[in-house]
Image (cartoon, helix red, strand yellow):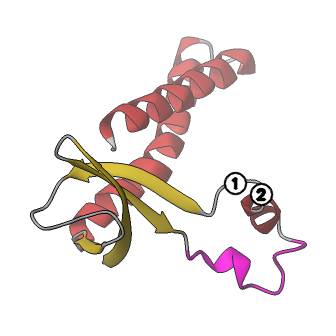
């Protein structure tokens, strides 16, 4: 997967890149009644991040970055599947501790989900 990024700042061998999100939520006719489309209106339509400076790149240039399909799959797994699995595993642990009380299942499921989100935030950059 390839994407073009605009260089908006160069400082100390670091280039700051900006990419406009081209999500389908803005072109879909149902976006006014869709929860995702409504939420998309409240957030920025671009992403900014830093990368090491490439030779010959200056402010205003466009650079193309590529991510392999295996890397894309592993990041999608970490962002979507891992937290859900952690929720179920946490609930299962809670069920093992006290099978008669749902509060333990809910609590451990919540702890597993939050832990997975924090680990994802730390490891996926």
Residue at the far right: name it: 33
Left or right of residue 53: residue 82: right
Q: Secondary structure at mark 1?
A: loop
Write down the quadrant of residue 23 in the picture. bottom right
Instruction: Point out residue 112 in the picture as x, y percentages from the top left corner.
Output: 51, 27
Write down the quadrant of residue 77 in the picture. bottom left
Q: Check disc 2: other Cα within 10 Å, few if <14, some if 14-19, many if 20+.
A: few
Q: Is residue 103 visible?
A: yes
Residue at x-position 62% and y-position 12%: 98
Residue at the far top: name it: 97
- 67 part of magenta stretch: no
Nearest the viewer among 99 and 20 is 20
Instruction: Point out residue 109 in the picture as x, y percentages from the top left corner.
Output: 59, 28
Q: Mark 2 and mark 1 in contact? Answer it, CB < 8 Å.
A: yes
Residue interval drawn in magenta = 22-33
Name the dominant secondary structure of the magenta segment.
loop
Instruction: Point out residue 88 in the picture as x, y percentages from the top left corner.
Output: 54, 37
Q: Secondary structure at mark 2?
A: helix
Which residue matches tag 1? Answer: 43
Write down the quadrant of residue 33 in the picture. bottom right
Numbered badge on residue 104: none
Nearest the viewer among 104 and 115 is 115
Q: Check disc 1: other Cα within 10 Å, few if <14, some if 14-19, many if 20+.
A: few
Left or right of residue 98: residue 1: left
Left or right of residue 58: residue 13: left
Instruction: Point out residue 104 in the picture as x, y percentages from the top left corner.
Output: 65, 16
Left or right of residue 14: residue 86: right
Residue at x-position 33% and y-position 44%: 125
Which residue matches tag 2? Answer: 39
User: Where, quadrant-wise, is the N terminus in this rendering?
Assistant: bottom left
Nearest the viewer among 40 and 95 is 40
């Amino acid at each position: 997967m390839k994407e073009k990024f605009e260089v908006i700042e160069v400082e100390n061998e670091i280039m700051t890149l900006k990419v406009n999100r081209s999500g389908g939520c803005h072109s879909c006719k149902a976006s006014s009644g869709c929860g995702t489309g409504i939420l998309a209106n409240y957030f920025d339509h671009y992403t900014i991040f830093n990368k090491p400076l490439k030779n010959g790149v200056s402010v205003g240039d466009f650079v193309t970055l590529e991510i392999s399909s295996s890397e894309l799959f592993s990041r999608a797994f970490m962002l979507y599947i891992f937290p859900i699995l952690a929720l179920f595993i946490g609930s299962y642990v809670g069920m093992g501790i006290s099978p008669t009380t749902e509060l333990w299942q809910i609590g451990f499921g919540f702890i597993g989900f939050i832990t997975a989100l924090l680990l994802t935030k730390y490891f996926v950059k």
